[in-house]
Image: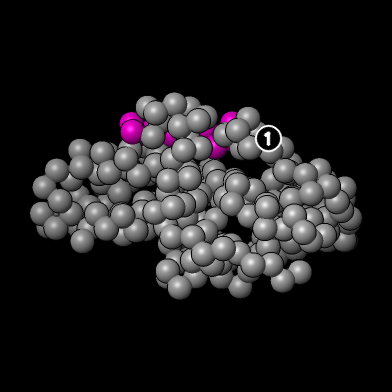
Amino acid sequence: MTNVHIPYLERFTIEAMAMNLVNATFGKDAVHEPCIIDIHYLAEFQLNATIDYHRLSTDDTILGLSVLRDGKVNTFGPRGGKRRVQLSENTIVLDSKALADSPECRERFTVAHECGHLHLHKKCFEHTNSVLAPIQEHRVDPLDGCEMPQKYASSAEWQANQFGAALLMPQPAFRLAFKDLAPGGWFSIEDQSEKEDIVQALADLFGVSRQSVAIRIDTLKLAA
């Protein structure tokens, strides 16, 4: 992978960029009212992306990739044999086998993450021959969370995770839903099972995993 400078982006900048994209695609209600964002529609009709499916690894470690320019990409056949396939610019490639036994929210976050690469990082690679957005050492599985230490703010993977979370859980809508469910604040709730019910309710409202909700609560300092 060619060494490429990824500009430092503060989380609030990424949040604003994601909210603008949601607003441009679905209108302001989607930013301010809790709903399940149709992330596939946003990818296809706002970012002009194509969703495609190929086997990306033999051990299910790669859930998705972003194709930055027309070119050939390494994939695998049903028996594990390597295949080179020609893919078009702005293709989001998902590994359907790796996602097969996962909840729908896993694919949704994977698509949102790859939208982050296409929206935030494509121009960074214009001067290179790179076909794919980077898979860096700080990659985070969608179900393991979307927040990383701020020292990784120049990491393409950290940025894409932040962007994906902000797409699926726009900050105004998430804050509103949290306030409705926990009007007295997080620490006013002593019953752990009640907190778990709130996390589940938020996960259902936004079509994401419980872990992503928990991290979003922490990221937005709603439990502070």
* Magenta residue span: 32-41
Q: Residues within 10 Å of mark 1 (few under 14, many from 20)?
A: some
Q: Quadrant of residue 42?
A: top right
Q: Quadrant of the N terminus?
A: bottom right
Residue occupying the point 75% across, 63% down: 58
* Residue 86 colored in magenta in the image: no
Residue lying furthest front: 127
Q: Quadrant of the C terminus?
A: bottom left
153 vs 63, left or right, is: left
Say if 132 sits above or below 136 in the image.
above
37 vs 138, left or right, is: left
Q: Quick check: can you spot residue 58?
A: yes
Say if 27 sits above or below 97 in the image.
above
Q: Position of residue 78 (x, y in %)?
A: 82, 53
Q: Tell me the residue that label 1 is attached to.
A: 48
Q: Quadrant of residue 176?
A: top left
Residue occupying the point 43% across, 60% down: 10
Q: Position of residue 220 (x, y in %)?
A: 31, 55
Q: Position of residue 14 (x, y in %)?
A: 46, 52
Using the image as rendered, state which of residue 167 and residue 143 is in the foreground. 167
Q: Secondary structure at mark 1?
A: loop
* Residue 34 colored in magenta in the image: yes
17 vs 193, left or right, is: right
The amino acid marked with disc number 1 is Asn
Using the image as rendered, state which of residue 75 and residue 48 is in the foreground. 48
- Report the colour scheme: one colour
